[in-house]
Image (spheres, grey):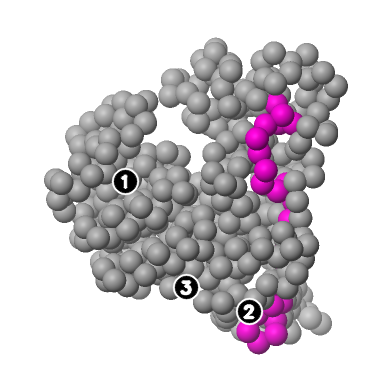
Amino acid sequence: MTKKIVVFGLGARGLIYAQFAKQYPEKFELVAIIENNESRIEMAKAEFSNVPVFSDYKDFLKEKIAADIVAVATQDNQHKEHAIAMMAAGYDLLLEKPIANNVEDCYAIYQASKEYARKVIVCHVLRYTPFYSTVKRIIDSGKLGEVITIHASENVGYYHQAHSFIRGPWRNKAESSPMILAKCCHDMDILRYLMGEECLSVNSYGGLYYFNEAHAPKDCAQYCSECKYEDCIYKAQTLYLQEHIRSFARYFTTRELTDENVLEDLRGTQYDKCVFKNDNDVVDHQVTIMQFAKGKTACHTMTAFSQEIYRDLKIHGTKAELVGVVEKNSIEIRYFGGETEKITIDVSEANVGGHMGGDYFMMNSLYKDLNGEKAEGVTYLDVSIDSHLMSFAAEESRLGKGKTCAIEK
């Protein structure tokens, strides 16, 4: 049965959900868009011409439009207001991560979900990737024996760090969230999901080491467009013209992504600023150690300093170890005293969104869940909040120079 969806916030994330509905009308009908950015409103009217667009969510609520789910994809610090308003009006939610950028707001949304008896599914898209779904099935099959410890790393990519966490919306934790929450609550959720038990405490170390004025080249300009250092690897005019990065230009232009349009619309914007002369304060490296309920452990490393964006994983069990790289969709199971089993994962079915198929399969799981079917990966706010409590504890530990922080739910 087709389900009706509202997209609240038509940024990079919200656009994926709207496009999924457009491409699979037998699954979702897009019944409204809420967006207050003028250029995105114009884009919405052109791309989804038969869908009403509201610039104020209060005007949307007055219309009492029937919907099975509202996808809340606004900025992190707006989630509390927007999520609670939608639930109070009777809507279930697909809520972008992070749930909120502080503990109090997370709990406020959680309490509201119980008060209004609404479903809240958090967009922990990594759960739905064929890679992590396969890993979870392998663990549950017993092939690895009992899992004892897990090591995971998130290699953000030098250009992604520059775009999102130095120049972009997530550069300043007061305006968005700490890096461990904004970027890595995905990973905290995956570790909780794969381990299959609650995390009790964390220790974390890290900081903003490199992207500050102390490392700025001599006499470099405030803006890349005015800078004499043409060979800087972070020069915006070079980065945004690279094919695998060009789509990031959507953050500062809605025009066709030609070289001329990108360079013209980039000049003088936040995304043209020098990476060493900005107001960013989120970390560029962080290591977090976790202890779980039965004494098992995990370690997670986040680093800005990688050539590409990728996540890798090592799981150590009592019978075998598992190693894999998400972006390569490759897994090896190395049996103790035996052979190595190699698994290649097919993600060709996923044709909407990113995250190695995670967006596509999440929307399919959402559709099944809304129709009362068993849907792999789907969890509600009571479990999803664990990853955020782990992230908040990690940030508290980091600021406390690695002190042990217990996680209290």
Label 1 vs 2, first from the N-terminus: 1
Separation (CA) of disc 1 from disc 2? 36 Å
Q: Is residue 89 magenta?
A: no
Judge whether 327 appears above or below 127 on screen: above
Q: Position of residue 309 (x, y in %)?
A: 66, 45
Residue that extends furthest to the bottom in the rendered view of this protein? 294
Marker disc for residue 383: 3
Q: Which residue is mark 2?
A: 200
Residue at 71% x, 39% y: name it.
158
Q: Position of residue 395 (x, y in %)?
A: 66, 60
Residue 81 visible somewhere in the drawing: yes
Tag 1's secondary structure? strand
Q: Are marks 3 and 2 in contact (CB under 8 Å)?
A: no
Indicate the amino acid at tag 1: Val
Separation (CA) of disc 1 from disc 3? 24 Å
Q: Main secondary structure of the magenta part?
A: loop
Q: Quadrant of residue 301?
A: bottom right
Indicate the amino acid at tag 3: Val
Indicate the amino acid at tag 2: Leu
Q: Which residue is mark 1?
A: 7
**Viewer-proximal residue among 403 and 192:** 403
Q: Is residue 288 magenta?
A: yes
**In this rendering, the label closer to the viewer, 3 or 2:** 2
Residue at 47% x, 63% y: name it.
104
Residue at 33% x, 34% y: name it.
36
Highlighted range, magenta:
274-298
Q: Position of residue 10 (x, y in %)?
A: 37, 39
